Image (cartoon, rainbow, N blue to C red):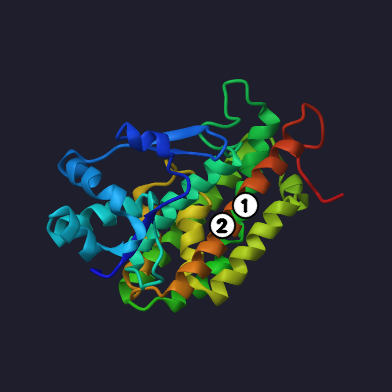
Amino acid sequence: MPIMRLALASWVRPEGLARRELVLGSTEGESWEVVPLDVATADATWRVLHLMDGQRTLMGIATEARLSLTRVSWVARELYQRAVLVQTGGLRVDALTYYEHLRSLASIARRRWGTSPMGPRGSWTEETSRRLTLGYLLESHHLVAAVAAHREAVVAAQATERGKALLSEGLSRESARLIGLKRLLLAAGLTEEELEQATPLSSMLALIEHLRWLGTEDALSYAACMGVGMREPDEGDDGDLREWMEPFADSGPLSATEQARIRQRLITCCRLTMAHHRELIGFYGAEGGPRVFTGE
């Protein structure tokens, strides 16, 4: 909106700006990535970026930079979606735009906390032990087995038939994944008795309970957790991504209170996911030990 006020996020490195580079990094000076700019908007970006101080409105910036409001708004939207900019005025934000902002925020949060141990740049190597691989598959089996308990309430809460249909299709995909995971585990040598005795690690139980609560209380936060909080940026197929964008596409603009609520619950989900990955490595990463966790 013309009256929107935006400011550079605290993780944008000031020394990069002097080189006309958008460098993201921690306060200790570590650089995470350089955000690429679209060639068509790069010139306008550098003309307005220093004016994004959280005080000027987009209309005021357009006037000062002698650019059209449309062009300034386009730049602002792109950088907001990448979490290079944050809003300071507490205004409503288009829900789908906020979802893209959340995807970038989750990626930044993981870099601040350290790369997920089980992510693409984490513990998966050619030397990954058989026990750890089986443990990962087993914990995935526990997670997928619990999906129906929290997703059905979210399906029912969707405002459109399209939204209901997409999430229902996702539920069918999860059922197929559960069958596939069980087959993999049995083919790898686990027995039916071991599968019945196995229980989720405590951090997985906490994650499942968090999702179950969100499923009945907060469908949008649930969609953010499922679509963003539980996967690395390059994980997930197109069906998964469309599925969890749909609730936001069907939602109206989000108030500042709604934005804060969803953001906080997403951050909680990210923390639980990373805590689970660390516990998974702690239990199943050792050379010796039981093949399945039973809680004993």
Q: Residue at x 70, y 32 (%)?
A: 131
Q: Is residue 42 left or right of residue 15?
A: left
Dot 2 crowding, Cα within 10 Å, few <14, some 14–19, many 20+: some
Measure how far apart labels 1 and 2 are at the Cα level.
Answer: 6 Å
Question: Around disc 1, counting alpha carbons within 10 Å, would you say few (fewer than 14), some (14 to 19), or many (20 or more)?
Answer: some
Q: Which label was assigned to residue 142?
A: none
The residue wearing badge 1 is 271
Q: Is residue 228 above or below residue 26?
A: below
Residue 85 picture location, percent across and down: 37, 53
Q: Judge by depth and name the residue closer to the eye, 152 or 178.
A: 152
Question: Quarter holding the N terminus?
Answer: bottom left
- Location of residue 147 by image quarter: bottom right
Q: Residue at x 13, y 55 (%)?
A: 67
Which residue ends up furthest to the front in the rendered image? 64
What amino acid is labelled 2 in the image? Answer: Ile
Q: Residue at x 39, y 69 (%)?
A: 89
Q: Position of residue 48 (x, y in %)?
A: 24, 50
Classify 261 as above or below 70: below
Q: Is residue 165 visible?
A: no
* Residue 92 image offset from top left, x and y in percent: 36, 73
Kindly state the secondary structure of the residue where label 2 is placed.
Answer: helix
Position of 94 with respect to 137 (left or right) is: left
Give x and y (percent) for residue 287: 77, 26
Q: Looking at the picture, does residue 152 appear above or below residue 268?
A: below
| Label 1: element kind | helix
Q: How many marks?
A: 2
Q: Is residue 159 above or below residue 26?
A: below
Is there any visible trace of residue 56 in the rendered image?
A: yes
- Near-viewer residue (189 or 228): 228
Q: Are marks 1 and 2 in contact (CB under 8 Å)?
A: yes
Residue type at the position of mark 1:
Arg
User: Label 2, on which residue?
Assistant: 267
